[in-house]
Image: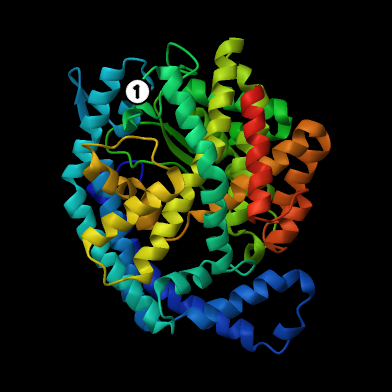
Amino acid sequence: MSCDSLDEEKQQAFQDFVQNFSPPLSVYEDKFNHKIYQHPNFGDLPAEYLTFVRSVKQQLDLFREESIPLMTASTTLGQKYATINASITIEHEGKDLTPQQAGKLLDAQDRELRRRVWEKLSKRRAQDQEAIEDIFDEMIQLRHKIALQAGFDTYTDYRFVDRGRFDYTIKDTHDFHQAVEQVVKPVCEWFHQERKAALGVETLRPYDLQVDIFGSEPLAPFQTAQELFEGAERILTRLKPELGEMLRIMDERGFMDLGSRKGKMPGGYNYPLMETGIPFVFMNAAGSTSDVITLLHESGHAVHSFLTRDVPLSQRNPPSEVAELAAMTMEMLCLDKYDEFYPDPADRSRAQKNQLYRCISVLSWIAAVDAFQQWVYDHPGHSREERAQAWQELYVRFHGETVDWTGYEPFLHGQWLKQSHIFEHPFYYIEYGLAQLGALAIWKNYRTDPGTCLQNYLSALSLGYTKTIPEIYEAAGIKFDFSEAYVAQSVNDCFEAYKSW
């Protein structure tokens, strides 16, 4: 369905699944959980089943049959949002370009070209804003009712429990937000000043944020999706031959859809297939450096799927804080093998520095998205004007005010609309930030002792969800920590590497 959103038969099949299969399935899952819980030996399961036991109890506490129609309606709205997003194209020089293809032009050194393309994309997205905000307004009310039916005051509180966040609290997320504001924002403002000086502009505009400041021409790491696959396969083979073999198996099965095309939904994902343990990878490659990073990221998820294929189903799927650690760490472990895509040392250095910049700057976006969702669901009766104002304040809180949005204020107010997680997977986002800190810590260990570090990383992934999040992070040789001191340590180490690369 996501590979071809314009196919009405596939869309209908998805809707049939959501409306006619998932609802009765959730009822049977609840009955099954009751059988497990009521078994006389349930309380005697050994310690290695802790994560399973607490998940069963949590699901029993949360399940409300009367919430099923609300959840179905919310999922259907999420699909409607995705379909709208997948239809977005802009015209440039007589060609229709997807956002991914158009986004490549934002790497151009020609500032006027960047401005035109950025404005076209922003205006095109704005055409759908009212329809998308209608969807979101309805989602908020549905999700608020789900929370109330489960005995929670807000969907923020409900979703925190629903996502299985046993190993940290909502207060911890607030501490993370504060740490990003205090530690990451000043570094991002430093990056912006560096960018402004390198580009030779008096003010930094939103269409100046993607262009590479280290070279005269955009990097072109590959031309076709096949070249992208082959480069990633070589990198993973160099890291460990078995990892490259995993990608080859997926490719041979036709389980990789990498190129961008009209009607294909935006974004990227790895979808585990439970019977074989061979996953499917989806993305929208258009020939950019970010595409390389995306495939390496999804390859981390894919490796995780392979490594857990023999873990019992009840403990196979780790929480997102662990799943994203697998993916974001893979990005970093491949950093020293960029010569597969960038044989020229100067190009390779540019790509590596851009990745380090991204590792830090993305934390500001993650904090903004998470804090925004908390505000939205803590204030379910808000107006659209209040929502736009809340987003702008949070954006500035975590990104600073170096970028000049004068004349583009409506586009700033709608920046959050392009983040699909907010619509399709609510509150699934802070995990990227927590995992990014872990990935930076593993990368630091890798530079000191690559062999031991890689073995620890793969061993940790092999655990599936047989251990708690802190225990899995410990197995990887790091701490599960996002205090301000730890954020500062991780970010400053990455920042120093960036400056000295």
Q: In this view of the protein, which residue sits in the foreground, 230 or 89?
A: 89
Does any portion of residue 212 appear in the rendered image?
A: no
Q: Nearer the viewer, residue 203 or 23?
A: 203
Of 353 and 398, nearer the camera is 398
The quadrant the C terminus occupies is top right
Q: Position of residue 200 (x, y in %)?
A: 39, 17
Q: Residue at 64% of width from left, 59% of height from top? A: 316
Does 300 sit left or right of 5 as displayed? right
| Closest to the observer, 201 or 25 | 201
Horizontally, residue 32 falls left or right of residue 475, namely left
Q: Secondary structure at mark 1?
A: loop
Residue 132 pos. (x, y %): 23, 54
Q: Residue at x 38, y 48 (%)?
A: 395
**How is this picture coloured?**
rainbow
> What residue lies at 31% left-to-right and 41% top-to-bottom?
4
Residue that numbered label 1 is attached to:
202
- Callout 1 amino acid: Glu
Circle 1 packing at 10 Å, graded few (<14), some (14-19), many (20+), is few
